[in-house]
Image (cartoon, rainbow, N blue to C red):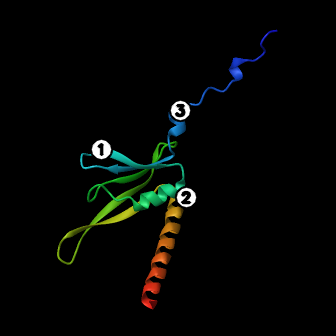
Amino acid sequence: MKNTHDSNHIAPPPNAQTATVSRYHIYRQTHTGSYSVPFKTDSAVEAVEAFLNQSPAFEGGEVRLWNNPEQRVSAFVTWRTEKTDFGFPVFNRTNVFNERLLGLIAQEMQVREEMREEIQHSVRMSA
C-alpha cells in the first residue's frame, strides 16, 4: 500500500530558541556601557511592575523595557537633574511608555501603590 501521507503538510518542529524567548525583556545599562537583562517575562503586567521597580546600575543609568517580538523599546527611563537647596545634584526619574497599554497598566499600579501607602499611614496613625 502506498503511503498517502504528504510530508509538505507536516508542521516543522518548533524552534527551541524561539519557544523560550520571552516577550518582554528589561535591559539595564552597566558602568561599562553594555546592558544586562535582569528580568524576562511574557506577561505585560509583570513586565511593567518589574520595570517600575527596576533600579539603574548607577546614577543616571538607562533602563529599558524591550518588546522582543515587535523588536522595539516599549518603555524607557529618562533622568532629570535638579539641584537641592544645598546645591547637590539629584536625579529624578521619569518613566516614558511608548505603548499605551503598558502606560495604562503603570498608572493603575501607581494608583494602587498610593492607596496602599495611604492605608498604611492611616493604620499607623490610629495605632
In the image, what residue type sits under mark 2?
Answer: Leu
Do callouts 3 and 1 mark residues in contact (Cβ within 8 Å)? no
Q: Secondary structure at mark 2?
A: helix
Badge nearest the viewer, 3 or 1: 3
In the rendered image, the residue lying farthest to the top is 1
The crowding category of the residue bearing disc 2, from other C-alpha atoms within 10 Å (few below 14, some 14 to 19, many at least 20), is few
Alpha carbon separation for disc pair 2 and 3 = 29 Å
What residue sits 46% from the left and 90% below the top?
126
Mark earlier in primary sequence (2, 1) = 1
Alpha carbon separation for disc pair 3 and 1 = 26 Å
Mark earlier in primary sequence (2, 3) = 3
What residue sits 53% from the left and 62% below the top?
105
Give percent across and percent down for residue 83: 22, 71
Mark earlier in primary sequence (3, 1) = 3
Badge nearest the viewer, 2 or 3: 3
Q: Which numbered tag is attached to residue 34?
A: 1
The vertical placement of 35 against 99, above or below, is: above
Is residue 7 rendered to the left or right of residue 94? right
In the image, what residue type sits under mark 3?
Answer: Ala
Alpha carbon separation for disc pair 2 and 1 = 28 Å
According to the picture, the residue beneath numbered tag 3 turns out to be: 16
In the rendered image, the residue lying farthest to the right is 1
According to the picture, the residue beneath numbered tag 2 turns out to be: 101
Query: Which one is in front, 80 or 68?
Result: 68
Q: Secondary structure at mark 3?
A: helix
Quarter holding the C terminus is bottom left
Query: Which one is in front, 23 or 39?
Result: 39
What residue sits 34% from the left and 59% below the top?
55
